[in-house]
Image (cartoon, rainbow, N blue to C red):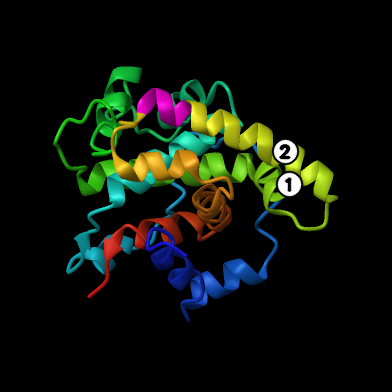
Amino acid sequence: MCDFIKPTLKLANHLSPVIIESMKTSNLIGTNRKDINNRSIFGNTNDDNIYLNCSIASDASRKLDFLILVIETLQINATDTLLLKAKNYGLSDHFSSRVHLWKMRCSNPLRKTHTFSALSSEQIDSLVELIASMAENLYPLIRQLLSSKESNTLNQERWTFFSSRLKSLIRERMNTQRSYIASLLSDDKNEFFRELLVILSLSCGKAGACRLKASLYNQP
């Protein structure tokens, strides 16, 4: 298992009452839900205090960009949906246009166009909200891809379609001269793609956004 997913899995098993309660209850529903205008999925908690002594992980921008890439693979019009959700959540300052979203994603050093800039904590919070919300809407598809109850033939067909589209987006957006990207494209087992889907599945539910956010920070 690569280091990319370990913080998220560690957090999923964290002995926090909020996280444990959310994982016990059936928050990972298989149907889409309507957006609630101007409501943050972080709720009214004082989560910011938890991260006062934490630093943003070096791979945070890379992780967030790849998670959005998976979302784009699962939903054709994902960018438009992200921008609409941002408006509904009152995040339009960071997502006023496709260009603003693109600039944030270009903080990923593995992209063909890299801005050499780091994401701010406010930008990370906004992206986490949107990714968690999109992950919950797309959970039925995510569950199908991760399911071991379907026939091998059906699973193979789904994974062939999913991985081929995701690899196509990676070739289009990422720097294929980087050895890391080349290894992803040549991996027939798609282990990294599966890990990204696991992260998205853990980002669903009542405490999903909190789990995802915590995985983006170096814990003291």
Q: CA distance from mark 2 to mark 1?
A: 8 Å
- Picture coordinates of residue 133, whole percent (x, y): 52, 42
Q: Is residue 172 inside the magenta stretch?
A: yes
- Picture coordinates of residue 212, whole percent (x, y): 42, 56
123 vs 38, nearest the viewer: 123
Judging by the rendered image, the residue that carries numbered circle 2 is 158
Q: Is residue 56 above or below residue 78?
A: below
In the image, what residue type sits under mark 2?
A: Arg
> Which class describes the residues within 10 Å of circle 1: few (<14), some (14-19), or many (20+)?
some
In the image, what residue type sits under mark 1?
A: Gln
Q: Earlier in the sequence, mark 2 or mark 1?
A: 1
Q: Is residue 126 above or below residue 54?
A: above
- Picture coordinates of residue 115, whole percent (x, y): 17, 30
What residue lies at 22% left-to-right and 75% top-to-bottom?
A: 220
Judging by the rendered image, the residue that carries numbered circle 1 is 144
For residue 189, which numbered disc appears in the image?
none
**Span of residues in magenta:** 169-173
Q: Is residue 114 inside the magenta stretch?
A: no
Name, please, the residue furthest toward the right: 151
Dominant secondary structure (helix, strand or loop) of the stretch shown in magenta: helix
Q: Say which quarter of the image contains residue 182.
A: top left
> Which class describes the residues within 10 Å of circle 2: few (<14), some (14-19), or many (20+)?
some
Label 1 near label 2: C-beta < 8 Å? Answer: yes
Decide if residue 106 is in sight here.
Answer: yes
Element under label 2? helix
What residue lies at 25% left-to-right and 27% top-to-bottom?
A: 103
Name, please, the residue furthest toward the bottom: 15
Residue 23 left/right relative to 147: left
Residue 47 left/right relative to 187: left
